[in-house]
Image: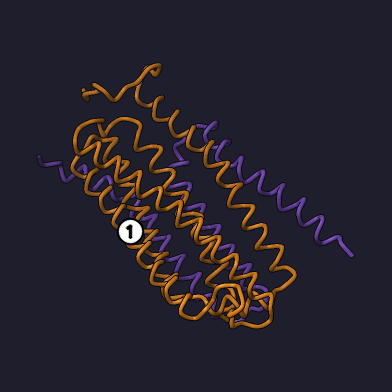
Chain colours: A purple, B orange
Amino acid sequence: MSEPSRHQQGLWQGPALAWAVLILLFLLNLGSAYVPLGPGNVALNLVIAAAMAIVLAVFLMDLQNSTILVRVVAVTGLFWTMIMFSLTFSDYLSRS
Amino acid sequence: MSDLSGALQEPWPDLRLQREAVGLGMWFFLASEVLFFAALFCSYAVYRSFNAEAFRIASAHTEIVYGSINTAILLTSSLTMTIALRAATAQLRRTTLICLGATAALGVAFLITKGLEYHSDIDQHLIPGPDFPLKPPATAIFWGLYWIMTGVHAIHLSAGIGVVIVVTTLFWRGTIPVQGSTMEGVAIYWHFVDTVWIFLYSLIYLAGRS
């Protein structure tokens, strides 16, 4: 069974662009790890990782076309993660 | 009009709503998964905040080549998974099957690379215990977290590969139609496993390179 090539091209356009951006960010992340920035290295690596996660979530997990309800549920885990980190570090960093 | 026989389930009036419901359910599940992995990342952050130099030394002993190859593999598998989902929605059965097969193959390639990496780590005795070679002692905390975090991730990926293989088989046999809502949940889960790896790669392999 043949499937129209026009359809095939439409399937790849958006996701292929998102993939290219992800690969570029990955290479940028890898390269930046070898630049001596001291404590700035891990911060930069995490910022680039967060940017990659956003590209993945918005374009490949298709949150850009999701309903508000789905988007709210998608950030719920991050919200509770923020609370977990805040409470944990408020304890550890305030110990004498 | 498209053939919806077998694709539409009760109580949904149309496939769009049914797919949305499956996606929503998967996102609810992933919210709990985010917290599961967040607890591990939080442990990493706490120990690293008190042992920054030890973590830098320990991280420099991870296999950056294997880690980088695996990152490229997983990012590419997310592309093939997205195409599989789009093809399924467009009822392009053959493209769906090919892309699902490619996704599973890339997942297996990740596990093989991970196996090679684990073999190299074991050869260097990088397992916390009596023969652990690195100093200071806090480097063992990093390597303990390394085995737990990458191991748990590999288990999640293995589950994903299993699901992809089962779904591909069901599509291939025609047991369930490709244009149903099954692909929605499978794709979101796969991308999540990829997202977790992106952060693991940054914290485990890239720390301590400069």
Subunit that carries the residue with mark 1? B
SS category of the residue bearing label 1 = helix
Identity of the residue furthest to the left in this view? A1
Based on the displayed image, in which of its 4 quarters is residue A35 positioned?
A: bottom right
Picture residue at 49% right of the left edge, 54% below the top: B195
* Residue B144 falls left or right of residue A29: right
- Near-viewer residue (B164 or B14): B164
Identify which amino acid the numbered label 1 is placed on.
Answer: Val
Question: Percent from the top left, x then y, of residue A90?
Answer: 81, 55
- Near-viewer residue (B180 or B43): B43
Picture residue at 40% right of the left edge, 52% below the top: B158
* Residue B82 falls left or right of residue B34: left
- Near-viewer residue (B136 or A17): B136
* Residue B124 falls left or right of residue A4: right
Question: Percent from the top left, x then y, of residue B28?
Answer: 54, 36
Q: How many labels does the image show?
A: 1
Picture residue at 55% right of the left edge, 68% below the top: B204
Tell me: residue A56, above or below residue B124.
above
Picture residue at 46% right of the left edge, 41% below the top: A64
Pointer 1: what residue? B108
Based on the displayed image, in which of its 4 quarters is residue A18 positioned?
A: bottom left
Identity of the residue furthest to the front in this view? B130
Question: Looking at the rendering, in which quadrant would you find the C terminus of chain B?
Answer: bottom right
Question: Percent from the top left, x then y, of residue B42?
Answer: 67, 57
Question: Percent from the top left, x then y, of residue B161?
Answer: 35, 50
Question: Looking at the rendering, in which quadrant would you find the N terminus of chain B?
Answer: top left
Identity of the residue furthest to the right in this view? A96
> Mark 1 Cα within 10 Å, few/some/many (few <14, many 20+)?
some
Tell me: residue B85, above or below residue B80.
above
